[in-house]
Image (spheres, grey):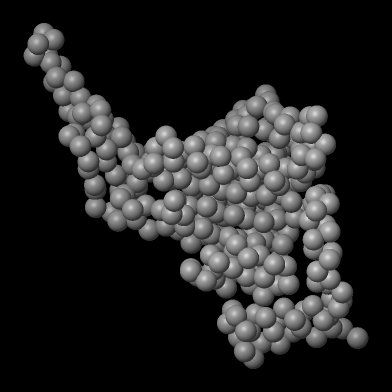
Amino acid sequence: MKIQLFRLAISGIATLGFLGFASAQQITGVLGSPGATTTISGKQLPPPDPEFGGVIDKKASGSKGWWAPRVVPPKGAPNVLLIMTDDAGYAAPGTFGGVIPTPALDRIAKSGLRYTNFHSTSLCSPTRAALITGRNHHVAGFGVVGEVGTGFPGYNSIIRKETGTIGTILKANGYATSWFGKNHNTPSYQATQAGPFDQWPNGMGFEYFYGFMGGDASQWQPNLYRNTTPIYPFEGKPGWNLTTAMADEAIQYMKGIKAVAPEKPFFVYYVPGGTHAPHHPTPEWIDKISDMHLFDGGWNKLRETILANQKRLGIMPANAQLTPWPK
């Protein structure tokens, strides 16, 4: 299974480089037959319905049925896994010079690219809105964190339809789209079972949602939803942890898509809340990291170590200097 992966660490989040596809229309099968497929230009979303290509006669014998071709991505379109972590600085993972081991990300980085031009709005839901729409956070309705939204354009925590999320765009182009983890982009007054649900992930182009609403959640007993239905998988399971369960759920989702429709690429937006308060790692991870003594040298020493690592990796200029501490 080939996956194109973007990892964006945030104090807010980073910007998203978009996927470029060939614009020439690609058609498979015989047009009018149920199995025919087509790509679209993407210049208009949702795409206009094609004109009926069959024949409607006064007699059935003179009529000819016709099915609109199913929209699919261009040949070779990649699977995309977009991972975003909360409140973790650019230099936190080892992949970007930090002292926290991230061997899986290291392997991906060695066969791909490390992006070093990092931007965020310094706030959570505004940067998330910018990330999933590719637009300025005010244009996306999130000039402030959703919980303190105001009744003014650009600050009302509402992503308008014309803004368009990456889920909406890729879904319209034939992708299987999903969202796992934190959802901080639904207005707080709509984040209940009463809806409306057009500002939930399912209403923003993501066909499958498994996650929690709002800025933070317990990793042991979260306010968890599958699509728009609350679920309680932790009941009777004292060792259950959302960070682990969410990974299992996402893996099962990807396997399921590939088992049923192996030719259909997926877009998985994977946004764990494990590094956001409240911090709830499992005892095994607390012991594992504590035993490494990664932070024993103190804050100042850690800054020097990370800068040296970043220069060695080539993601920081050789002449870069740390900001001096005030006396």
Q: Quadrant of the C terminus?
A: bottom right
Give the residue at x 83% y 80%.
300
> Where is residue 204 drawn, in percent x and y?
53, 39
State the count of labels: 0
Residue 314, relative to residue 1: is it above or below? below
Instruction: Please tell me which residue lies in front, 261 or 166.
Output: 261
- Residue sticking out furthest to the right: 327
Instruction: Please tell me which residue lies in front, 105 or 320.
Output: 105
Can the viewer see residue 294 in this picture? yes
Give the residue at x 79% y 78%.
302
Rendering quarter of residue 185: top right
Instruction: Please tell me which residue lies in front, 122 or 34.
Output: 34
Residue 278, relative to residue 189: is it above or below? below
Residue 38, relative to residue 123: is it above or below? above
- Residue sticking out furthest to the left: 62
Seen in the image, is 44 located left or right of residue 200? left
> Where is residue 307 drawn, in percent x and y?
70, 81
- Residue sticking out furthest to the bottom: 319
> Where is residue 45 drawn, in percent x and y?
39, 42
Give the residue at x 55% y 36%.
208
> Where is residue 325 drawn, in percent x and y?
84, 83
Give the residue at x 58% y 60%.
7
Seen in the image, is 227 located left or right of residue 70? right
Residue 232, relative to residue 130: is it above or below? above
Instruction: Please tell me which residue lies in front, 301 or 115.
Output: 301
Can the viewer see residue 14 in this picture? no
Rendering quarter of residue 194: top right
Seen in the image, is 28 located left or right of residue 310? left
- Residue sticking out furthest to the top: 59
